[in-house]
Image (cartoon, rainbow, N blue to C red):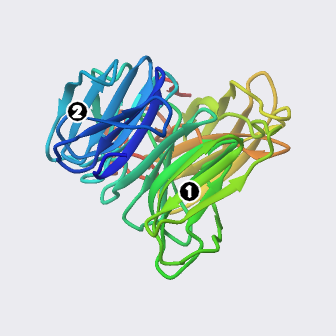
Amino acid sequence: MPAGSWQSVAYGDGQYVALSSVVAISEEMVSTDGTNWTALPGPVGEWTSLEFDQGRLVAVGSLGEIVTSTDGQQWTQVWHHSQFDLTAITYGSGHFVAVDSAVGATLISPNGNSWSLRQPIESGLKWGAVDYGNGTFVAFDDSGSGYVATSVYGYLWALHRYSPAENITGAAFGCGSFVASGEVAGSSNSLLSSSSAASWSAAPVPTDPTANWDAVAYGAHRFVAVDSAGDIAWAYSDPDCAETIPTTPRQVSGNVSSGEIWTYMHPSAQSGGAPVDSYRVSVTNGSSTRQCPAPVSFQPNCIIKGLVDHEVYWVTAQARNSFGFSAYTDPEFVIPVARWSLSAITTQPVISQAQPGGCSSNWHPC
């Protein structure tokens, strides 16, 4: 292959395309078989991630640029803001999502050409990877904080924490599970896996524990990861595997009244490998969390009492079958009050698990 610094590669329309992570004479190389490669001028930039979907290649770079191409030869710049460091891009649920490690912002696009900038998910977090699977976007922090964010649509995000914390730089979904790769100093537990994207378990890899696992991909019934020391690790999955846990409920809605909220779930689009047998609602104000189960019914619902009037709470829900819980719904925020009045709100909003996106129209006072 041509000399260069190649960090991103994607396959689409009968060819592999790789872009350079440094400004160079040859910014691109292409191949039809993955073995014989041809160097091309390509788009000038420091490209970190490349995705093919909807008939086009979309690349993001550390200089805050996004470019697209329908043939891998002619490229068009569609977005450029130099204060951002775009690290990864993925496609799912009908749109592209890209993440940033400079200020922790996310971007979303229905077609790869027009982009909307979303506010940081949480102040201080730096997103190093993003992936989509089983109806959920998952973004991974690359600053060693141990945070993962999930979203159904890519607009509002719920935060989850795992331990030991890693600098995550790669992610893949396959066979019903997410796998994330990164680096944790002095530990061989550098590959994480999860079916729900909310709780994660670490897997030891029998190589140099100080190596940084830069990237991971899924194909041919295997997860394959590569590290900075030149090692390749793989884990085999059952070729007959199926999506086992349900997809997330499509939404959580309900009513508010004095000291309590009444919620109901919009059922999951897919039940997974077994029927959905219950739902779980989580309500948090940032310092404490309450949960309640909801049985399967026409409108699965539960009531959580003992809340403080005029305080902001975040509400999420999960579906469950015999294989486990789904990912969380996108968070909605509610304020219990005896009688709804904007002048009655005396406390500042508490940001618990995602950046507020406005009070949902699905919530109504009793």
The mark that comes first in sequence, 2 or 1, is 2
The location of residue 199, given as percent across then percent down, is: 63, 57
* In the image, farthest residue toward the front: 36
Give the left or right position of residue 180, taking residue 249 as reference. Answer: left
Residue, disc 2: 42
The location of residue 87, given as percent across then percent down, is: 33, 48
Closer to the camera in the image, 34 or 352: 34
Q: Compute the Cα span from label 2 to label 1.
A: 27 Å
Q: Residue at left 65%, top 71%?
A: 204
Q: Residues within 10 Å of mark 1 (few under 14, many from 20)?
A: many
Q: Are marks 2 and 1 in contact (CB under 8 Å)?
A: no
Q: Residue at left 34%, top 18%?
A: 70
Tell me if residue 231 comes above or below residue 250 in the rendering. Answer: below
Q: Residues within 10 Å of mark 2 (few under 14, many from 20)?
A: some
Which image quadrant: the C terminus? Answer: top right
Closer to the camera in the image, 103 or 33: 33
Question: Which three-letter amino acid code belongs to the residue tagged 2?
Answer: Gly
The quarter of the picture where residue 90 lies is top left
- Residue 5 appears in the picture as rendered: yes
Give the left or right position of residue 366, taking residue 302 as reference. Answer: left
Tell me if residue 167 comes above or below residue 246 in the rendering. Answer: below
Residue, disc 1: 225
Give the left or right position of residue 44, taking residue 305 as reference. Answer: left
- Residue 199 appears in the picture as rendered: no
Secondary structure of the residue carrying numbered label 2: loop
Secondary structure of the residue carrying numbered label 1: strand
